[in-house]
Amino acid sequence: MKIFYLALKSFFLLMLLFLACGLFAATPIQSRAIRGVSAGEARLRLLASAESYLGTPYRFGGVDRRGLDCSGFVHLSFRDGLQYTIPRTSEAIYNWAQNIPTSELQPGDLVFFVTVGTRVSHLGIYVGGGRFIHSASEGPHTGVIYSRLDESYWRRTFRGAGRALPWDDEAAQAIAAARPGGNARPGGGPTAGSGGEARPATGSGGIAAARPNWADPGFFTGFGAAWIWGGGAEGPPSAFRGISALATVGYKWPNYRFGLELRPQVDSSLGVFRLPFTMSLGTDSFWVFGGSAYVFGEPRFELDDGSRRTYEGGAWLLELGFAGAFRPFHIGPGALSLYGEMAWQSYRRGEGQEFQFRPDFAANLRASTGLRYLWRL
């Protein structure tokens, strides 16, 4: 058990390192984002500046009225409306802004998307009523336009919401007076493209669906199922060794998440059923886990030379591993992803059994791939 406690201690130290990075990665900036104006006036100026660019064509790297890319549009809106210089790229603005739950979005906040690769690659300014203004590079309409967060493409690529300007009672009253329903211009008229009338906001942040989004911090749960690949105790590795399931609950921050997990496994090669209880810490794309597993049955390999390799069963044994996942598909309030795991599941040799590298290594190493679905509570 000594090795188990040492491994568990190491895991907790690693967890504290991850948490420290997550807690200190973002510094609130709203108080520095306005100069000499109220919170409401700052948001109205930003929205007015953004809407003044409606119809401007898209141009990669553009930062003037001849053409704007998405981050150039937001950068210029802040500069013109508030005389404030913000970072230039989508990813940099995402890291600069304060992450907020999607349900708290208000006019003048920012919305971020992952449209290419795995990093934030697009953004816009939320205007209320479930709509945002941005500079689109593809689609039936390009350039600076309005779009809706509940459109299938934007719902699927949505990464999260950010706040760069204060929000208080004064801001709420100013926005409500100047932009009824979250869609009116500061002068009081409806916005372009709204069909001639302002649409009422739904939900506390004016989003069509107020349920939590996977990008929001908070508690989560989920499940998964995986195929365990053969270990190759003798000859070439077999394609099938067993199956495993996953049930988890935990808490996620903007960049990291911590989970408690139950991982039942059927190992047909060893003829046992394992029931691991583990903790995990990491991101949506990479995480480590560790804990203890109870083994039902007497694990053993049948070798071609007729000898029997017996390992200790009916005991609590160590389980440590790491895992990775491809970019998730956002479905409803959660995220579906293909993941893979590599785990060391300690078995001890039976009495009188000598160490043999290949069967012992195959017994202790588990490789699996599967699907998991996690969602915000």
Image (cartoon, rainbow, N blue to C red):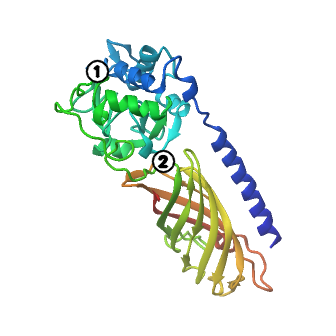
- Quarter where residue 136 is shown: top left
* Residue 210 pos. (x, y %): 37, 50
Q: In this view, does 268 lie above or below 111?
A: below
In the image, farthest residue toward the left = 196
Q: Which of marks 2 and 1 is in front?
A: 1
SS at mark 1 in the image? loop
- Quarter where residue 304 is shown: bottom right
Residue under the image location 55 percent in, 75 percent down: 265
On the picture, is 264 further left or further right than 290? left
* Residue 192 pos. (x, y %): 22, 26
Other residues around mark 2 within 10 Å, as few (<14) / some (14–19) / many (≥20):
many
Residue 362 or residue 150, whichever sits in front: 150
* Residue 340 pos. (x, y %): 53, 59
Point out which mark residue 216 bears.
2
Q: In which quarter of the image is the N terminus?
A: bottom right
Point out which mark residue 187 bears.
1
